[in-house]
């Protein structure tokens, strides 16, 4: 039973921690325009999350946090059985508002504003990584009701996990095996190989390269990697941050032109960073941007093979995606 | 480049094989009722996949197969780089039609017909496991356009993979570690622990138990496990197959009554079987049935945290799901 708030439970079949946050089922879902909780509070108007007349970028705690230091309780076991360890759902879930304007998305920001958001992402990564019990900081931003965005106001989120989440743990384990076998950094080797092949490069700049990975699993997928080995956003120089703002906006613009038609492409963008304490010499910062749209009006559903067996089937090829993105 | 048909590519970041089947993007999508390709061909009518006047259960190869022995080519590397091994997309993808009736689902079958489908699943598992290059047979059936079903005719699918897919490989690795550490079978220990706790049991019969797993990640999720240690469907006795037909129909009925309202619950049901060649003494057959519906009209989307980081957040608890399913 859950006492004292949300809980994470260990799944012995997969070795993964599952967060149980049953209070989140009542969260705000697509409110009317005059009740946008991420807008500045208007004089005499609906009290929003932000008591300011206007803002550039604002970060605050999610009102329906999955992970929070206020989730009390002690480590234990479900029904007292050692098969099922539990922890309190410690950590943080923050909302990053990109603009006080109620519509738009990251791609409609100016380069200057985009740079400010990246600064906020880096600052919060550093700050959250210093919180007790935080093992991993994950920054992401989504667009589109097709992938479950529940508020149209342009915003992203940050999750500070009390464990290293499965995708990060998996990549770290692969990088560790690779280093043991070859003495080399897996992420660096992949970037070098993409440069050598050249067939999947979408855009390059002084400090960054955007490419479609050779085994891309989503209908549209781009990775952005820095040219220098860095573990996370706080390790980027000012010049690298400036450059990231420009190339990320360039990639988002290409995504918007990827399919014909007026509907913007729904996408998920995640910043993959080294865990706070583990593998910081092995991991290498990169961004992953992908879409579930496989054709105008047609979604890639995660059905039996993907959802139940975690095996991906792509309806296209990485080279086709890259060709199309280069010509956009 | 893809020559000679679909290909599977190794993702060095995750160690997973991704199937690239670019011809599938043109597959049939929700055809009109008079063009149901899974109906028996009517005299003088639209030529369907099945040239029979009527049928009980029919199995045939998917017309848009992701995996097929006709996918030619040889193992190699993307752009000649050893980071990215490739294989031809060998294997099979089959369609199992449950009934010649154009509407309905597994849950609307009689126990007798359901038993026939289970017999077909077991027969195809045995037969496909004997095909050269097949490493794993995955039987599944989905219902609902919400999870991407592209044909309303009641049917399921079978994928015979040329590799052990990620979820099966992960469970096997966990079971192997557990056996090394404790000398015990992980799946058996979990079933025994669920019986001891009792709090998540949904239904039991002579040969099977249905329970909500203690770390359930989906809004509605049930596992069905046999009482005897068996690796796969072909290993079930006649009595265990009879009993599976009954308890699976019972569970599907409970799922249909889970939320109020007339809309049937969309679900994905997968049969987790031991790989063809690996870990057959460690793995234990079980069925997993789950839904992406978290409330009437509200889907659980796999957004940033799930899709990009593979970390699951549940909006409910396993005990609540089990309470509700028991009372349905």
Image (tube, coloured by chain):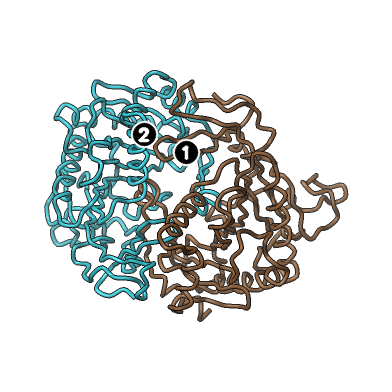
Chain colours: A brown, B cyan
Name the front one of labels 1 and 2: 2
Q: Which chain is indicated by disc 2? A: B
Residue that numbered label 2 is attached to: B178
Residue that numbered label 1 is attached to: B217
User: Label 1 vs label 2: CA separation?
Assistant: 21 Å
Residue B182 is situated, as x and y percent measured from the top left of the image, at 35, 29
Say which of A146 and B85 sits in front: B85
Say which of A277 and A164 sits in front: A277
Q: Residue at x 52, y 56 (%)?
A: A146
Query: Measured along the vertical axis of the image, is residue A324 above or below residue B277?
Result: below
Q: Residue at x 39, y 53 (%)?
A: B148
Q: Is there a contact, CB below 8 Å, between mark 1 and mark 2?
A: no
Q: Residue at x 39, y 23 (%)?
A: B194
Residue projecting furthest to the bottom: A327
Tell me the quarter of the picture where residue A271 sits: bottom right
| B60 sits left or right of B327 in the view | left
Q: Which badge, 1 or 2, comes first in the chain's sequence? A: 2
Say which of B79 and A248 sits in front: B79
Residue A13 is situated, as x and y percent measured from the top left of the image, at 39, 37
Is residue B45 at least partly visible in the picture?
A: yes
Residue B241 is situated, as x and y percent measured from the top left of the image, at 19, 31
Same chain shared by disc 1 and disc 2: yes
């Amino acid at each position: 039973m859950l006492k004292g708030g949300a809980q994470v439970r260990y799944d012995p079949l997969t070795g993964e921690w599952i967060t149980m946050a049953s209070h989140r089922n009542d969260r705000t879902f697509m409110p009317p325009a005059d009740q946008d909780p991420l807008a500045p509070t208007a004089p005499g108007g609906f009290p929003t999350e932000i008591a300011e007349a206007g803002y550039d970028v604002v970060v605050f705690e999610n009102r329906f946090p999955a992970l929070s230091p206020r989730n009390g309780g002690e480590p234990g076991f479900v029904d007292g059985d050692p098969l099922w360890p539990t922890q309190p759902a410690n950590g943080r879930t923050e909302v990053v508002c990109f603009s006080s304007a109620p519509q738009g998305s990251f791609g409609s920001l100016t380069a200057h504003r985009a740079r400010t958001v990246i600064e906020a992402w880096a600052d919060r990564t550093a700050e959250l990584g210093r919180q007790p019990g935080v093992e991993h900081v994950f920054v992401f931003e989504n667009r589109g009701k097709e992938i479950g965005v529940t508020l149209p106001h342009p915003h992203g989120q940050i999750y500070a996990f009390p464990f290293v989440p499965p995708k990060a743990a998996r990549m770290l384990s692969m990088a560790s095996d690779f280093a043991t076998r070859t003495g080399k950094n897996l992420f660096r080797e992949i970037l070098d190989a993409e440069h050598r092949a050249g067939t999947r490069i979408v855009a390059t700049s002084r400090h960054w390269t955007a490419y479609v990975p050779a085994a891309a699993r989503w209908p549209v997928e781009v990775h952005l990697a820095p040219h220098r080995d860095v573990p996370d956003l706080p390790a980027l120089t000012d010049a690298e941050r400036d450059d990231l703002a420009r190339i990320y906006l360039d990639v988002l613009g290409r995504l918007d032109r990827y399919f014909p038609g007026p509907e913007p492409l729904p996408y998920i963008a995640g910043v993959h960073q080294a865990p706070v304490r583990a593998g910081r010499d092995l991991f290498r910062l990169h961004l992953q941007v992908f879409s579930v749209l496989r054709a105008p009006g047609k979604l890639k559903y995660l059905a039996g093979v993907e959802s139940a067996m975690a095996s991906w089937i792509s309806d296209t090829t990485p080279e086709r995606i890259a060709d199309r993105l280069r010509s956009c």
